[in-house]
Image: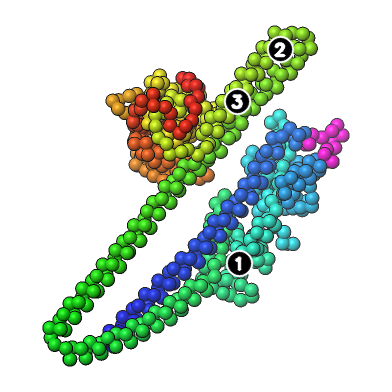
């Protein structure tokens, strides 16, 4: 009996230690992983902010004018320095420099790497090729920066380079607040950024003990650390977060102590019970002993059933809460994807606003001249044109606000034609930018009503049209066709393009979350998954096939609705018009 107790106690202690280790390790890794994710976003956000600055500056006429020399060959050094100081101050950059193609510095905001010619030739060479130059720079004084460069051209001629140098002081200052070691290593294995000043610009091989995986130099001695690494592919850097495994060892020790004490206690109780049972068996009659044993069995089984019922109740409650959180997360994911789509369309939409604004300004200037000459009819005509342009901009704004707001859960009859028109209004600028000249809407779309939510159904068509535009980008004969027909109590809608289609082995996967055929940075693969979920919520189906003549065909099957019952989601109906863009 003692041997059995010893074996069971040993098994219980081993299991407790293993479980405690796994829980503690999971907790340490989770917290370190959260730190890693947050710092990755911070570092990427800082670099993305400055990455866009040189191309924007190089396109401004005021910046291009700085690279013009006078008749004696003198440059506009004073104006250029003022501009560099203003840009550097507003953007909080380490430095902003304007450089001629031969490497001569036109001006810069403050003393920096550009005056020591560090990395300058390569930044100029890449900018001259029409690409965004980038380089991680450091010097013997321990100064570090990341430089972005963009070429400046006048009448197609390369006349200079705009260089923006990133200041990592705020990033490292934020890292210094963390108790964990946070650092970045480059391709050569050198620590470029770190919240420990002694680690900066040192090879990682000097900070990590040779032959001892997971042992790092901490405060002058090597200690065990868990290293979590996140790759930054665009920069070709690795972001590290070191977690202290001490809580894991403490949890193991605590679990072993508690399990041992519990084992001893159980052993003592078992010994007492055995003694008493032995005495009872000797003294009691056989029938009484059997009765006692039967009662004990019934009691144990009743307790086991009670415990099982409690466990099942708790499991049901946990699953219900998990399902509720899942539904909330799905709703938030739909809204996030919608805002992401708006962000992707922002550049093209800004062009849709800039054109009417330029026309309004021109008509207003002409109206003033006509008014001075007393030409009242011409003034009235210009004001009418201005009013039409303003109405056009207002309609686009109303559609954007309606699309971006978070939808409700109401489902009811919605006009299919209006939803398609609003989706086209949002997707049309992106289509023009991608060179897609034709988006044809069939006559069958008008007058049909389907059961759904207006905002979410609009998101479905925006995603499908944008996917078609992405597939047709750069294709000279690009065409997107949208049509609908009624089949009994169902409405069948098709979105067709004449692009390259989808690989046959990828067709079953297109509606899976995070599956995408786009390049890195162009999509995360949740658009079609959200479309599938929305259509299912409305009691419909969606499928995709390749057309024999080329291109993809998305087929949506929705329930038909009675238009007299109103519109879902409590939104107003915009005037629908059939159009070919």
The residue lying toward the viewer, choosing from 536 and 225, is 536
In reply to whether residue 136 is colored magenta, the answer given is no
Q: Identify residue for label 3.
A: 393
The residue lying toward the viewer, choosing from 511 and 458, is 458
The residue lying toward the viewer, choosing from 175 and 108, is 175
**At 54% across and 70% down in the image, what residue appears?**
244
- CA–CA distance in space, label 1 to label 2: 70 Å
Is residue 374 left or right of 497 when viewed as pictured? right
**At 61% across and 49% down in the image, what residue appears?**
45
Tag 2's secondary structure? helix
Q: Quadrant of residue 149?
A: top right
Q: Residue furthest left?
A: 287
Q: Report the magenta residues as a range.
A: 66-79
**Looking at the image, is mark 1 or mark 2 nearer the viewer?**
2
Tag 1's secondary structure? loop
Q: Identify residue for label 1.
A: 179
Q: In terms of secondary structure, what is the magenta stretch mainly?
A: loop
Q: Quadrant of residue 84?
A: top right
**At 67% across and 21% down in the image, what residue appears?**
360
Q: In the rendered picture of this protein, how many numbered marks are placed on residues?
A: 3
Residue 234 placement (x, y as % from top left) = 57, 49
Q: Is residue 548 visible?
A: no
Placement of 84 over or under 472, stated as above or below: below
Q: Earlier in the sequence, mark 3 or mark 1?
A: 1
Q: Are marks 2 and 3 in contact (CB under 8 Å)?
A: no
Q: Around disc 1, counting alpha carbons within 10 Å, would you say few (fewer than 14), some (14 to 19), or many (20 or more)?
A: few
Q: Identify residue for label 2.
A: 379
């Amino acid at each position: 009996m003692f041997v059995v107790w010893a074996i069971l106690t040993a098994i219980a202690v081993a299991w407790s230690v293993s479980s405690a280790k796994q829980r503690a390790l999971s907790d340490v890794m989770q917290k370190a992983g959260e730190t890693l994710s947050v710092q990755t976003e911070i570092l990427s956000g800082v670099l993305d902010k400055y990455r866009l600055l040189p191309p924007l500056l190089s396109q401004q006429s005021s910046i291009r004018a700085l690279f013009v020399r006078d008749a004696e060959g003198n440059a506009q050094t004073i104006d250029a320095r003022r501009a560099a100081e203003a840009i550097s101050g507003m953007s909080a950059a380490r430095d902003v420099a304007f450089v001629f193609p031969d490497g001569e510095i036109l001006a810069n905001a403050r003393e920096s790497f550009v005056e020591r010619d560090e990395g300058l030739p390569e930044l100029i060479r890449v900018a001259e090729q029409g690409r965004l130059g980038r380089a991680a720079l450091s010097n013997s004084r321990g100064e570090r920066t990341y430089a972005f460069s963009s070429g400046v051209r006048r009448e197609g001629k390369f006349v200079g380079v705009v260089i923006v140098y990133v200041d990592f002081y705020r990033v490292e200052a934020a890292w210094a607040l963390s108790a964990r070691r946070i650092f970045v290593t480059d391709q050569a294995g050198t620590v470029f950024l770190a919240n420990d000043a002694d680690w900066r610009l040192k090879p990682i091989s000097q900070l990590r003990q040779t032959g001892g995986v997971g042992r790092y130099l901490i405060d002058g001695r090597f200690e065990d650390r868990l290293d979590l690494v996140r790759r930054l592919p665009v920069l070709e850097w690795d972001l590290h977060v070191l977690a202290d495994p001490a809580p894991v060892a403490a949890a193991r020790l605590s679990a072993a102590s508690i399990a041992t004490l519990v084992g001893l206690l159980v052993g003592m109780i078992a010994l007492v019970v055995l003694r008493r049972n032995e005495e009872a068996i000797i003294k009691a009659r056989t029938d009484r002993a059997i009765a006692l044993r039967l009662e004990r069995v019934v009691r144990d089984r009743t307790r086991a059933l009670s415990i099982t019922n409690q466990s099942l109740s708790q499991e049901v409650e946990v699953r219900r809460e998990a399902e509720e959180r899942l539904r909330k997360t799905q709703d938030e994911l739909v809204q996030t994807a919608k805002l992401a789509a708006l962000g992707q369309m922002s550049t093209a939409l800004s062009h849709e606003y800039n054109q009417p604004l330029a026309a309004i300004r021109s008509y207003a200037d002409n109206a003033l001249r006509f008014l001075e000459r007393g030409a009242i009819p011409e003034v009235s005509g210009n004001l009418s044109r201005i009013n039409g342009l303003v109405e056009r901009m207002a309609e686009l704004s109303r559609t954007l606000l309606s699309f971006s707001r978070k939808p409700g859960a109401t489902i009811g009859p919605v006009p299919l034609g209006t939803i398609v028109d609003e989706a086209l209004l949002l997707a049309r600028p992106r289509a023009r930018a991608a060179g897609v000249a034709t988006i044809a809407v069939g006559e069958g779309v008008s007058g049909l009503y389907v059961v759904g939510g207006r905002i979410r159904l609009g998101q479905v068509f925006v995603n499908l049209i944008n996917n078609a535009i992405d597939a047709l980008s750069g294709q000279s004969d690009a065409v997107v066709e949208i049509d609908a027909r009624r089949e009994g109590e169902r409405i069948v809608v098709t979105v067709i393009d004449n692009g390259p289609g989808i690989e046959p082995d990828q067709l079953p996967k297109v509606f899976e979350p995070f599956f995408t055929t786009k390049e890195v940075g162009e999509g995360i693969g949740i658009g079609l998954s959200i479309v599938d979920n929305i259509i299912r919520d409305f009691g419909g189906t969606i499928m995709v096939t390749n057309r024999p003549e080329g291109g993809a065909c998305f087929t949506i099957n929705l329930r038909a609705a009675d238009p007299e019952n109103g519109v879902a989601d409590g939104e107003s109906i915009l005037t629908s018009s059939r159009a070919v863009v």
